Image (tube, rainbow, N blue to C red):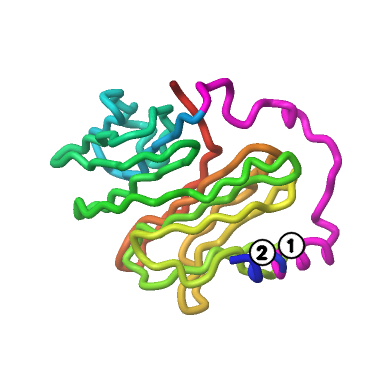
Amino acid sequence: MMQTSAMFCACLATLGLLTTAALGGDDRLYEGVFAPNTSFIRVVAPGAQFAAVDGHRLPTEDLVISAYVNVAPGEVAVDLAATAVPVPVAANLHYTVLVHDSGAHAVITDDLQASPAKADVTFYNLSDQAGVTLFAPAASAAVFEDVAPQTGAAMALRAPLTLTFEARAAGVTLAAAEAVALRRKEGVSLVLTGAAGVYELSASPHRYQK
């Protein structure tokens, strides 16, 4: 993804969209105060009625993109409505459990940088499209390309910045998320859901809970 990142940032710079100006709230901590060497797990399960991480039930209304739950290294159970997913957790990492409407699931290790000058952007494809591009029209550039179903991608982009993102397949825009705020030292996630011509692109800032 490094070549894609460089090309994308170059497009933003050409348009004058990269800035280092201060933005209200940028002095907030990226993930608060947690014990050293601990890690984080969240669940992306649109339409699910139940999910719990290490025994902590997640609010149903947050399951499109839940908060990251602070966990200790080791095997951690993520309980879903019909199954339990064991997640082998290493120290100082972020994990996302993707859950499709069919019940299929995948565990993704999120490559987050927590850079003081950038925002982490993650994207997950939970649709029926075989390969999805996350596109930023303001930069006329792809952030991620050919993201397969039940997989994700991550990249750190210069911040602060506000962008509209489009999910595209075969050159056709499936759905859009407008005015997504990117803040330094923080992150935002987007997830594409849907099938048979009806799609939704959801965006949420990264959130944390102990």
Bounds of the magenta segment: 7-36
Picture quadrant where residue 142 is located: bottom right
Quadrant of the snapshot with the C terminus:
top left
Please tell me whether mark 1 sits on a helix, a strand or a loop.
Answer: helix
Q: Badge 1 is on which residue?
A: 9
Q: Is residue 205 magenta?
A: no
Q: Is residue 103 above or below residue 87?
A: below
Q: Is residue 172 above or below residue 111?
A: below
Q: Position of residue 148 (x, y in %)?
A: 39, 68
Q: Position of residue 60 (x, y in %)?
A: 31, 31
Give 194 or 110, whichever is nearer the viewer: 110
* Cα–Cα span, label 2 and label 1: 6 Å
- Residues at circles 2 and 1 in contact by the CB criterion of under 8 Å: yes
Residue placed at 26% from the left, 36% from the top? 78
Left or right: residue 96 versus residue 165 is left
Please, what is the three-letter code of the amino acid marked with disc 1? Cys
Q: Residue furthest left?
A: 82
Q: Is residue 18 magenta?
A: yes
Kindly report the secondary structure that dominates the magenta region of the rendered protein: loop
Q: Residues within 10 Å of mark 2 (few under 14, many from 20)?
A: some
Q: Position of residue 8 (x, y in %)?
A: 70, 66
Q: Position of residue 93 (x, y in %)?
A: 47, 41
